[in-house]
Amino acid sequence: MKANRDVSVFTDLGSVLVPANLRCMTVSVRLFAAARAAAGVGEVQVDPGSLGAILRALESDYPSLAEVLPRCSYLVDGVAVHGDPDEVTVGDGLELDVLPPFAGG
């Protein structure tokens, strides 16, 4: 897990130091293969929450993902997650990888 520390934020007025307890919370979602193709982007930032809530938000923002996400596997900070997506919490500063099935040989 990443450290919860103060960060610099760059604005049009210059750099401002923002205390960790005041910064925006986000999760980096990395989309691979068919998920990337369906969304048209490789990475997005979303609010932390349950995996189920994050997937519903992705489907809302990128409707073409609705056909891909049910077949995907998910990693939270490199660890595979299983079970009910609404029971899996994806916290602030973590990475969520969306991995469609890969064809191979």
Image (spheres, helix red, strand yellow):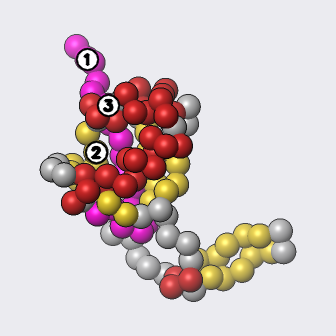
Name the image quarter holding the N terminus.
bottom left
Mark 2: which secondary structure? strand
Is 94 on the left or on the right of 10, as rendered?
A: left
Provide the residue designation for mark 2. Answer: 74
Query: Percent position (x, y) of residue 78?
Result: 28, 52
Q: Which residues are magenta?
A: 89-105
Q: Is residue 16 visible?
A: yes
Which quarter of the figure has residue 100? top left
Which quarter of the figure has residue 69? top left
Q: Is residue 55 above or below residue 102?
A: below
Q: How far apart in space, not on screen, are marks 2 and 1 (Cα)?
A: 19 Å
Mark 3: which secondary structure? loop
Query: Percent position (x, y) of residue 74?
Result: 28, 45
Instruction: Please name the amino acid that badge 2 sits on.
Output: Tyr
Point 51% across, 37% down: residue: 62
Which dot, 2 or 1, sits closer to the camera? 2
Query: Percent position (x, y) of residue 98?
Result: 36, 41
Residue 102 falls inside the magenta stretch: yes
Which quarter of the figure has residue 13? bottom right
Image marks 2 and 1: residues in contact by CB distance under 8 Å: no
Viewer-closest of 62 and 78? 62
Which mark, by number, is residue 100?
3
Point 36% across, 29% down: residue: 68
Query: Percent position (x, y) of residue 65?
Result: 43, 33
Mark before the other along the chain sequence, 2 or 1? 2
Q: Residues within 10 Å of mark 2 (few under 14, many from 20)?
A: some
Residue 9 falls inside the magenta stretch: no
Instruction: Please name the amino acid that badge 1 sits on.
Output: Gly
Provide the residue designation for mark 1. Answer: 104
